[in-house]
Amino acid sequence: MREVISIHLGQGGIQTGNACWELYCLEHGIQPDGQMPSDKTIGGGDDAFNTFFSETGAGKHVPRAVLVDLEPSVCDEVRTGTYRQLYHPEQIISGKEDAANNYARGHYTIGKEIVDLVLDRIRKLADNCTGLQGFLVFNAVGGGTGSGLGALLLERLSVDYGRKSKLGFTIYPSPQVSTAVVEPYNS
């Protein structure tokens, strides 16, 4: 089987990713609680959606994804949103203090404290794959988490999974739509 693990970093990555998972579910007939009424065989074989979803023993489909933010508000939106039952609680990782739109805080201080936990959760997902193809990384580089923690995590992924593909879906800042004056410096 060919599996892909999605990594969603920071507010931009999580919000973009949450929209993607909603579309994946609609596309494959998976309900917000992970159940798939059209799938009669539990543990059933080579379906295309198994690239993105793993199936539990109870027949629930869970995204092969990790959602990470250094502050809890966006993760809490996912934890209480429509698709709250889709994700395993260990897949949603949030810290207590944000990177304050600062690359250095996301890379060298606060991000450094959480990166080992994130890599451990990624490793657990990777261990459940029979043919891991690579990673989809969703982030925005205008803020501190997506840029700083994103760079740190990609460095560490290159060490642990050097030959695996890493495809980035990166949101870049725009002067027309700016939320922080330091966005160009972070990116």
Image (cartoon, rainbow, N blue to C red):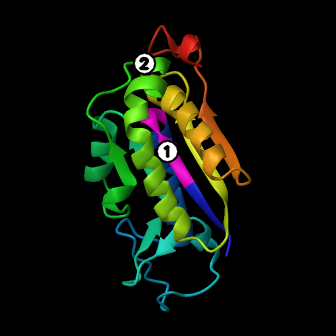
Q: In which image quadrant can residue 126 be found?
A: bottom right
Q: In which image quadrant can residue 110 be found?
A: top left
Kindly identify which residue carries mark 2: 101
The Cα–Cα distance between marks 1 and 2, rounded to whole angstroms, is 17 Å
Q: In which image quadrant can residue 4 be found?
A: bottom right
Among the two numbered marks 1 and 2 on one chain, the one whose residue lies closer to the N terminus:
1
**Is residue 18 something that shows in the picture?**
no
Where residue 72 appears, as percent x and y from the top left, is 28, 38
Q: In this view, does 42 lie above or below 175?
A: below
Q: Mark on residue 8? A: 1
* 52 in magenta: no
- The residue that appears at 28% across and 28% down in the rendered structure is 97
Q: In this view, does 65 lie above or below 177?
A: below
**Is residue 115 something that shows in the picture?**
yes
Where residue 107 appears, as percent x and y from the top left, is 48, 26
Q: What stretch is highlighted in magenta?
A: 6-12
* 8 in magenta: yes
Q: Mark on residue 126? A: none
Q: What element carries label 2?
A: loop
Q: Residues within 10 Å of mark 2 (few under 14, many from 20)?
A: many
Kind of residue sitting beneath label 2 = Asn
- The residue that appears at 40% across and 84% down in the rendered structure is 57
The residue nearer to you, when weighing 169 against 26, is 169
